Image (cartoon, rainbow, N blue to C red):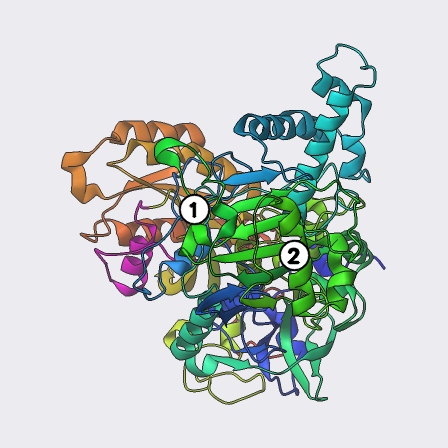
Amino acid sequence: MPRSAAQAQGGLPAATAFVQAALGQQLDADVIIVGAGAAGLKAAELLAPRMRVLLLEARSRVGGRIRSVPFAGGTAELGAQFIWGAESDIDGGSARQGNPVTELANLLPSTGQPTLDRCMSGPAADTLRLIGPDGRNLSATEQRYLQQRWTSDVAALASNATEGQPLAHVLRAPLLAQRIGGCSRPCPPSAATNASLALLEASLAAQLGAQHGATLRQLSAAHYDNASSPLGGDNIILGGFARIPEYMAANATSRLGSRLTLRLGTPVVAIRHGDSNATVTTAAGQQLQAQYVLCTVPLGVLKAGGVSLEPALPEASQVALDRLGVGRLEKLWMRFDEPFWEADGPCGSGADKRPCQQLEWLLPPGSQPPDGLPWRCFISMAAFTRQPVLVAVAAAEAGAAWDRASDVQLAASAMAALRAMFPRRQLPAAPRAVLASRWGTDPWAHGSLSYHSAASRGPADRATLAEPQSGSLLLAGEAVWAAQPSTVQGALLSGQEAALRVLDAAGELPQCGSGTGSGRERPGGCTMPPARPDDDYDYLFKVVLIGDSGVGKSNLLSRFTRNEFSLESKSTIGVEFATRSIQVDGKTIKAQIWDTAGQERYRAITSAYYRGAVGALLVYDITKQTTFENVERWLKELRDHADSNIVVMLVGNKSDLRHLRSVQTEDAKAFCEREGLSFIETSALEATNVEQAFQRILTEIYHIVSKKALASEDGPAAAPTSGTAIKVTEAAPEAKKKSSCCSSA
């Protein structure tokens, strides 16, 4: 099957086509989101303020594969456990990304407990203890050696691997043995080299197994590590990771009221989609209709056929889905009377001594104990909570044996491994309490997380799945996010991008039963609410605000659209979206203004954010030289992703702080002259030139559009065929008629 028209064009069809196709039908929502995990909740949060959203979740709880349960007086994380790279705010010039999960965690009510921040980002000698197959603790020197071999030799060889080659093949390459043996040509067989290779392979198997839930034979050599990671250490969330999705759901449903309906215990079994609208069928047989469906179920559910798609995915998407792997990562939580694993001394030395966070047993890959459960990784929660809790992690090849075993049998197997790891210590017969995850047999998961299999094309496969699958179907979730896959932050950002795609396509949807006003509350149907001044416009222009964090973009938006300013303005999680209409030459121009309040930190969803924009305000702070220096980078990114003829204005904000000025006006004007930009200095605090800035850019866009319209055959009164935004490069730009979007004109 060829790629859909929506994929070929790089976006969803505009709302007008949906509206006309839906005439006479009763729609249950404008958007149905399937799955209330991180991606679904984030998408709902962004979409519900602008349209009616129905969020369907098969489980009796929100969170998906985030599951926190009470355990032995504390909390056990059976799914997501750590905020990987917890830094939330980074320098605007950095290529690394901040973590949106930390932004959310900072909004949670305090538990009254001190935060225990421990880094587990890699096998560092001060946080990780490696134990050989015979129970010998590897020295700090040996651990550093393995880390160096991993980061230099293995990474270098893997970077040159061909598509389809598993990582295990790289470890058996003669060149790796030559590097480790220190030979200038192929080395003769050596017991020392073979021993080093065996330890390196075992270390990689433990680390990558716990990270991806896959074996070295399953992982792609070329793409196993194709992911960016946020800065900072790795944190746990006291009280449970599930507090984040619970907070998101409670906050959204209370704040958005009837705009967002959340239904728990409502499995979806089928989605029928096309270029006009979509129908979702639940397990109870109920059929629900919407203009858009956003499917956020896990990759394992899609691969298992848990949700039937009619028609099937486009060929390119189906191939991408088939190539991605679904990992098995199961956890066994065990509580003891004391942390016996720390008896040999804490990790680190001197003032840096502290509890080890992770223990790795370097079993050779492929070695299978009699019970089929090769335990390689143990996480010490004593390093975080001071409680004697050890989490045994089983990955990949342990799946089948895990599913057959009871919690007690799993604990007995883990204790046997621990006795082999600590042969000189008297260990307890069994833990005081045990609790095991069961993601492999979970019908709403069918596995733990996605990974790049040897057959995959890495991020390219995920990017293919992120494209619209038809005029009404989008996929989202950790498996669909190329930059940070297999993580909660990846799921959040994927849901955010999918929501932006819908908003971008549905620029006129609020005029068809999804906006605010008296006509909004009637359930179902595509009806025009009573006319309001803001609905009566001739042109709709999308304008984006870009620039470094903290330059005042959000206050510029609020000052122009609501005449408000906040001295305590905080960075927005996600995207702010506001509208205001102005008059130009007797025409009503409606500005649809998008604020990147968080994107400049995550650097993640630029293509969806810029799509359809005809104007941009590039903002810097006149008191911060670095924000001006970064303007060139922002302009390049804008030109890489937006229309080549987009109208751009450079804005020097915070002119009220002229006594602290570090960017000279002459320098900004020279930059604008060189780049062909207009320029203005503003103060959102004093409301100086804010109105003029938006008026000038909207007027310039209008004059470009109106001249092109006059040159076209139909003129400016032509019936619209697109309802998102006017494109300044089109030969015959579209102007909106002052009529219902549901008219057939």
Q: Hey, what amino acid is under mark 2?
A: Ala
The reply, left or right, for residue 168 in relation to residue 29 is right
Name the residue at the top extreme: 184
Circles 1 and 2 in contact, beta carbons < 8 Å: no
The one of 374 and 290 positioned closer to us in this rendering: 374
The one of 644 and 596 positioned closer to us in this rendering: 596
The residue where tag 1 is placed is 118
Q: Hey, what amino acid is under mark 1?
A: Arg
Residue 457 found in image quarter: top right
Eye-nearest disc, 1 or 2: 2
Disc 2 is placed on an element classified as helix
Residue 557 in magenta stretch: yes
The quadrant in which the N terminus is found is: bottom right
Residue 323: give x, y in percent of width and height: 79, 51
| Res. 503 in view | yes
Residue 41: give x, y in percent of width and height: 52, 68
The residue where tag 2 is placed is 414
Residue 74: give x, y in percent of width and height: 44, 67
